[in-house]
Image (cartoon, rainbow, N blue to C red):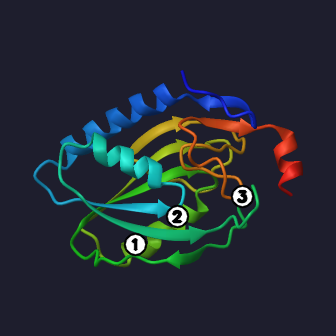
């Protein structure tokens, strides 16, 4: 059994839930891209845990690249302004590209990324997201590989952070109120 961090108020997704769904998504990705070249693009920092687990769940070879974007800063709400902090190292022209994203809140950041990446002329472009918040999503997105819809709460764990902490938790949960006060 996973030990629960004392700062966690409730668990939204258990480690077992996540690992089961990631294995299913990895199998589906492998089937869909069998015999094809595939480039996984991880959106840093949050998606690094999901990207590693998805890659290990896949039975096909893939290449990896990363982008770092910011729309949150140190807040728990998106600012709506997207900045690219680290761009891709690889040319995307003619490539099958799969964006790996930890969570889709409003969808504004991912929508921006999709437009940016489409402009680089990939052969195909799809999205794999562990979590979505349908109640707060402002942009319609076609997410081909989808893990879980979750309530519109701020969550941490499995790559997601609050002020750079809690990314290493193997589950996803909400924080107790005292954490926000202590780290303000």
Q: Nearer the viewer, residue 130 or 108?
A: 130
Q: According to the image, label 1 marks what residue?
A: 117
Kind of element beneath mark 3: loop
3 and 1 marks in contact (CB < 8 Å): no
In the picture, measured across the screen, residue 1 lies left or right of residue 178, that is left
Percent coordinates x, y for residue 171 in the rendering: 56, 35
Q: Nearer the viewer, residue 71 or 168?
A: 168
Determine the image quadrant of residue 172: top right
Location of residue 97 with respect to 1 vertically, above or below: below
The reply to whether residue 60 is visible in this rendering is yes
Q: According to the image, label 3 marks what residue?
A: 163
Which circle, 3 or 1, is nearer the viewer? 3
Percent coordinates x, y for residue 43 in the rendering: 48, 62
Mark 1 → mark 2, Cα distance in angstroms: 10 Å
Percent coordinates x, y for residue 36 in the rendering: 14, 56
Q: Earlier in the sequence, mark 2 or mark 3?
A: 2
């Amino acid at each position: 059994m996973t030990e629960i961090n004392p700062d966690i108020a409730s668990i939204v997704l258990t480690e077992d839930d996540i690992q089961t769904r990631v294995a299913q998504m990895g199998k589906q990705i492998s089937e869909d891209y069998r015999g094809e070249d595939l480039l996984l693009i991880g959106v840093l920092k949050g998606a690094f845990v999901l990207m590693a687990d998805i890659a290990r769940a896949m039975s096909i070879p893939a290449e990896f690249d990363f982008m770092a974007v910011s729309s949150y800063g140190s807040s728990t709400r998106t600012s709506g302004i997207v900045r690219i902090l680290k761009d891709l190292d690889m040319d995307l022209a003619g490539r099958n590209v799969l964006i790996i994203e930890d969570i889709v809140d409003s969808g504004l950041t991912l929508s921006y990324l999709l437009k940016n990446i489409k402009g680089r002329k990939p052969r195909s472009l799809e999205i794999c997201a562990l979590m979505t918040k349908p109640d707060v999503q402002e942009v319609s997105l076609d997410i081909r590989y989808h893990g879980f819809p979750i309530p519109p709460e701020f969550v941490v764990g499995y790559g997601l952070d609050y002020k750079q902490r809690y990314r290493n938790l193997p589950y996803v949960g909400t924080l107790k109120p005292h954490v926000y006060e202590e780290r303000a």
